[in-house]
Image: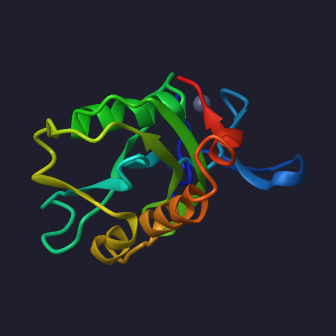
Amino acid sequence: MMEFRYCPHCGSKTVPREIGDEGLVPWCTTCELPLFPMFSTCIIALAADSRAGEVALLRQRYISAQYHNLVSGYMKPGESAEECAAREVEEELGLKVGGLTMTGTYWFGKKDMLMVGFIAEVAKQDFHLSGEVDQALWVPPERALELLHPYPAISHRVTQYYIGHRDQSVPATLSERRISL
Ligand SMILES: [Zn+2]
């Protein structure tokens, strides 16, 4: 976890200071600012065509030669998680996102990263892969569980969410958490 020992604004050494209920937080005495620990926020998205009953998996050799993964990417400053999810699905797979459902948020401790999970509704068609993606394929979601990287299993949780909610029909259940773009 990135704890600030120096102020990123002015370079002064920070000192621990009691901040309300937060306890001891690094403090810059020059800027008079608390410097809370920093972490990355990423999206992870299962691109799914519910009518076709299939979801899209990617294989990216820089992540794993053996396992598949879901669309994921770092959020950019100024972007909402929803905008990021739609952008990443379009960039990585070349598919337009028709709607998004948030499945939850997941802490990925090994990378000190908060992941925001989505189901991204897309229409099944040929992929237009980005250079970061070596291969992609359409599979039923149950098959996806076998092909996905077993660690840290966040992709499994997003896919399980989809499997658990899809039979209750998209409009009824997913719409409660569905986000318009
Ligand atoms: Zn400072």
163 shown above or below 76: below
Residue 138, image x and y in percent? 24, 55
Residue 3 image position (x, y, % from top left): 56, 54
Residue 8 visible somewhere in the drawing: no
Q: Is residue 159 above or below residue 19?
A: below
Give the side of residue 93 with respect to residue 119, left or right: left
**How is the structure coloured here?**
rainbow
Which percent across, then down, holds residue 164? 59, 65
View extreme (right): residue = 20
Residue found 27% across the figure and 73% down from its top: 147
Q: Residue at x 33, y 28 (%)?
A: 96
Q: Is residue 136 found left or right of 103 in the rendered image?
A: left
Q: How many marks?
A: 0
Residue placed most toward the observer, 17 or 41 = 41
Image quarter for ligand 1 equals top right
Compared to residue 26, the image places residue 181 above or below, namely above
- Can see residue 71? yes
Residue 127, image quadrant = top left
Q: Residue at x 66, y 29 (%)?
A: 30
Q: Nearer the viewer, residue 41 or 156?
A: 156
Task: Give coordinates of residue 60: x percent, y percent.
Answer: 17, 57
At 15% from the left edge and 48% from the top edge, which residue is drawn? 133
Residue 179 placement: quadrant: top right
